[in-house]
Image (cartoon, coloured by chain):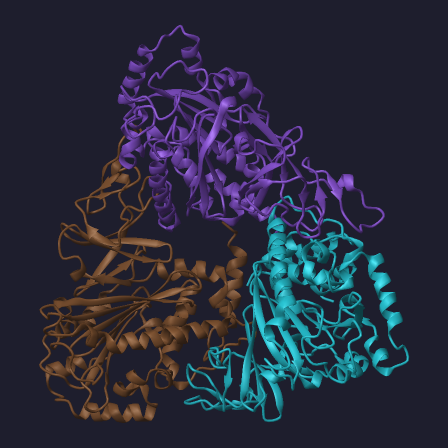
Chain colours: A brown, B purple, C cyan
């Protein structure tokens, strides 16, 4: 609506003023122009984790993936998982009003325009003679499956996932990405700009002071020296020549600004827990059956990320998924997903309360932290401060973010 | 506050890009500049239904008509109904704080500036020597009565209503506009831009899928062919040479973009109910005494509109009034008024619950529809789709709206 | 974020269009550009009353003073009262999360950066080699004490308070500013722009119609003629040659636009109560022990203001403090503080309910008035009206405000 030149100029100035090794300026979190630019440059472009195939096992099953002003129908169509914008091609009404359900066709509740599960328009009454149904399919959204994980991209030409698949298929097989199920999903509302939530997730500098439960299990919460010592202890404890170990210990660092142009960023790596700890639980002991083809616990946990908003923490017996999406400029939501192997039964093979304990506590603590971070950033006195050595991952996120906003 | 040129340029571009036969672009519903322009071009200019004389029968009685940031005092003054802005000429306080009441004078609660019922300033203490009371009357608002219906215009030079009065006085007499009373008034809050509510009211393409109760009574909810057949059946059933029939069947189409320049748009016409249906009620049978000079039920219902926001549905035994006004850019309110003849008594001649059943249900269904329409329009993926043949009235509204926003 | 020239032009036009003797244009209350300009020109520049030393008697005690997006830590450090922005120099988190408390050091809850009570950074883990703690102290805020009253200024170079101290030290001594304590503090939320609240406090034109309780005690609520008669009666009743009387009757008018350039505005004066009234209470009789060095009640009450937002009403037996700060453009808060001499005990020497009765009633009435003033100012029909002779003090506020916004 407004002419875009002065906005681009203002954003360009913000980008040019960024001082590497520091946090972002206040306007990156407060300017409506920045938020509008992020929609185009980030949310409409990158791959985002939307949910899991176990949520829609049968043809006709769907759920909605919603963020900011967008609503996307993720549906099990005849020939697999599809995604469509939840926007009627007639006058724009939402078509699916419930968060999940099962349908035979997608019928708009306003004027009954009817689409099949693939999004093709099959019925529209009383249209003019020159009306062409085939030009009025639902706006489709790209879908990619990583095992049962459903990723979507609203881009016309989505970023390539080929390097990720090539590098990590054996990892997905080992951890049984195809044979997991969603055990629990919870949304946590956060009164802060989405970047403050993502930044929070990118560094463990805050883990020791803020997350005593996490910090008792994960060695990465310690100082770099202590973390390094644990890494060496952990490496020494493994059977170096087993395929399982080699796969587990892969290290792929094509995340954020390290991704090749035209490809989506991704990362995989493994970190030690403290000696004796086997998984993320109240006593660090198993809370569910081993995942996939794993033959045993080895005292480590893997991390996998794909795109700028979706992160996974893979314990040997369960996997966490995290996604941060905006609901406005000053508010966002953190979605947590807990996965176990698909044949595990709640109450028998795992206990949902025990399974979810650590990260429910941890994200609630983060929520408070992030909101208080936003409050301080709001102040006119706020100046971006220097990052610590433990915030290198955040620096990669910031580098990527600045490039993305600059149009790269 | 902001320079107006770029805004005008942006609105001009939006207007130029409109594709006839289609819905409006997203920015028409989301841009603050558009909303600001609508205040001047539409709400401060056109006639709007404010209420009914039966609400203020005695001298000193008043009620407030409020929308967006405006509050208008509609008051029964010595020489008839007057309307004043509810804004003290001193430092701007609201003067009347209650939605309705009875006063001897209009006394500002802040500094006790006192106005008579005509809006003339009669008392202001301690003013400088050069202060002139006669220059500080309340800002007056134009009033026009259509029978007992009170219309207001905030324009300096209001649009002419002469063509409407000339064309329809016999209609108003037949239906007894002078001898009705307000039986019930209810406000329905709608979390959507006001245009989506008005658009919804302009077409019956949605009636069959969305309003089963209405669609059982009103033949206009059917396909054009079936509607036409009912029109013919209805016309054949009437005594063509009676004055009552001739008056009822008048057809005046000076609505929206069809209005003459300088005049307010209006429309009158009559449509058939289904065979056997006599009025808008649960069994389509009478719910109140016949209106005005009517001699009997004939199985039809009339429509009357005046200005872009005020619509009336005249059954033979009661009349509905509808008004849609913004409360902000993303929210509006639909006000429904139910009228019966003034000598009808609640509990004896009519039952308020029976009287209000059909349209209370119908607008609640519309409220949900309109809100879901807004949600879809919010999406960046939304594109204005093609209108059906049953949305010709909406096309007239859109044509008018675009011209109004363009300064015509 | 946006280029500032058109904004400055728009504000300059608003300023140029102001008509002396009248209220302000609507845009002064509604334009986001004006609100942004006020932050810099007023709130970040002028001295504001923050609280009282009796709230933080011991080293380590602190409370937060918060308005708009700002949070300031007022803390009792080793060498006196200090004020720091509640913004960590690392990534900006709020440091103190509770409204008041006692601490040994200021530890950020996010990454545990640690500051001493003076705001110096004493601990920050894992920082790069070139990191310099001494460059990362908390942003400090200037503090000035007027007796136990704590004033703060966020300016780099705060306005001089020297004329105020030179003129009024004997007044502060007489009323015992050093020996008061805070008896009660209450915040009143007001859904209106902060200026409408300050304007309300600047004139007693509204006292007679709006504040019957106040108007029974304070002669200033009467017409100028009656007020003058009471002034003369009051003056005649005093022992003109006593030092106490001479000090009480001082009159210093360096308020608002009357302040010397580079100095903060202030005012002191004394006004009569009605004959027989001794203080501001339900029966106008004493509610607490005499303040400071006063030897008796004389039937007057003094006013002291410092800066544009902080006002004090000094009865002979208690003192009121008022502060108005924005919480956004359309909302503000009025904070009321009741002070008594520090050795007075609640329940024995005074009764808190009796002490707070008059001004709790009065500000609640004002809250309603101010909100209704905002509602009217919101209307497009609002035009700034002429001020009465009783609003001369408001005129000084407006003159000062316009100069401040113009950069003077």
What residue lies at 12% left-to-right and 89% top-to-bottom? Answer: A239
Across and down, in percent, residue B129 comes to 85, 48
**Number of callouts in the render?**
0
Residue B301 vs residue C159, the one in the foreground: B301
Q: In which quarter of the image is the C terminus of chain C?
A: bottom right
Q: Residue furthest right?
A: C241
What residue lies at 61% left-to-right and 45% top-to-bottom? Answer: B96
> Height in image: C45 above or below C79?
above
Q: Quadrant of the N terminus of chain C?
A: bottom right
Is C361 situated left or right of B67 in this image? right
> Height in image: A270 above or below A103?
below
Residue C96: tell me if it is visible: yes
Across and down, in percent, residue A329 comes to 44, 62
What residue lies at 72% left-to-right and 40% top-to-bottom? Answer: B137
Across and down, in percent, residue B207 comes to 31, 33
What residue lies at 81% left-to-right and 80% top-to-bottom? Answer: C167
Is B91 situated left or right of C168 in this image? left
Residue C78 vs residue A296, the one in the foreground: C78
Q: Residue furthest top?
A: B241
Residue A57 vs residue B54, the one in the foreground: B54
Which of the 4 image quadrants contains residue C192?
bottom right
> Height in image: B302 above or below C169?
above
Across and down, in percent, residue A240 comes to 14, 88
Is B201 situated left or right of A213 in this image? right
Residue B301 vs residue A145, the one in the foreground: B301
Residue A75: tell me if it is visible: no
> Height in image: C229 above or below A256?
above
């Amino acid at each position: 609506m407004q002419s875009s030149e002065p906005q681009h100029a203002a954003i360009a100035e913000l980008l040019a003023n960024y001082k590497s090794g520091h946090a972002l300026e206040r306007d990156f979190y407060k300017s409506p122009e920045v938020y509008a630019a992020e929609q185009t440059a980030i949310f409409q472009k990158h791959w985002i984790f939307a949910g899991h195939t176990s949520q829609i096992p049968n043809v006709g099953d769907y759920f909605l993936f919603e963020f900011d002003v967008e609503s996307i129908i993720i549906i099990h169509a005849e020939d697999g998982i599809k995604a469509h914008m939840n926007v009627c091609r007639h006058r724009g009404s939402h078509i699916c009003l419930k968060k999940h359900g099962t349908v035979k066709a997608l019928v708009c509740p306003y004027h009954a325009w009817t689409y099949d599960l693939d999004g093709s328009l099959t019925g529209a009454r009383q249209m003019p003679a020159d009306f062409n149904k085939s030009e009025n399919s639902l706006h489709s959204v790209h879908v990619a499956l990583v095992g049962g994980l459903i990723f979507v991209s609203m881009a016309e030409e989505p970023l390539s996932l080929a390097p990720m698949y090539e590098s990590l298929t054996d990892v997905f097989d080992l951890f049984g990405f195809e044979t997991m199920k969603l055990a629990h999903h919870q949304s946590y509302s956060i009164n802060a700009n989405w970047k403050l939530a993502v930044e929070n997730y990118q560094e463990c500098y805050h883990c020791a002071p803020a997350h005593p439960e996490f910090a008792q299990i994960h060695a990465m919460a310690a100082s770099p020296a202590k973390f390094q010592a644990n890494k060496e202890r952990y490496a020494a404890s493994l059977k170096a020549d087993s395929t399982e170990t080699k796969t587990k210990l892969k290290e792929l660092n094509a995340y954020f600004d390290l991704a090749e142009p035209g490809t989506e960023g991704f990362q995989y790596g493994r970190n030690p827990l403290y000696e004796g700890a086997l998984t993320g639980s109240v006593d660090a002991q198993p809370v569910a059956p081993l995942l996939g083809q794993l033959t045993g616990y080895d005292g480590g946990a893997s991390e996998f990320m794909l795109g700028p908003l979706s992160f996974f923490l893979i314990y040997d017996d369960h996997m966490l998924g995290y996604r941060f999406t905006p609901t406005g400029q000053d508010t966002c939501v953190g979605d947590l997903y807990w996965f176990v192997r698909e044949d595990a039964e709640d109450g028998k093979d795992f206990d949902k309360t025990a399974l979810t304990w650590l990260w429910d506590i941890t994200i609630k603590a983060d929520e408070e932290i992030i909101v208080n971070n936003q409050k301080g950033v709001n102040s006119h006195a706020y100046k971006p401060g220097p990052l610590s050595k433990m915030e290198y991952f955040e620096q990669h996120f910031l580098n990527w973010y600045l490039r993305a906003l600059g149009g790269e």
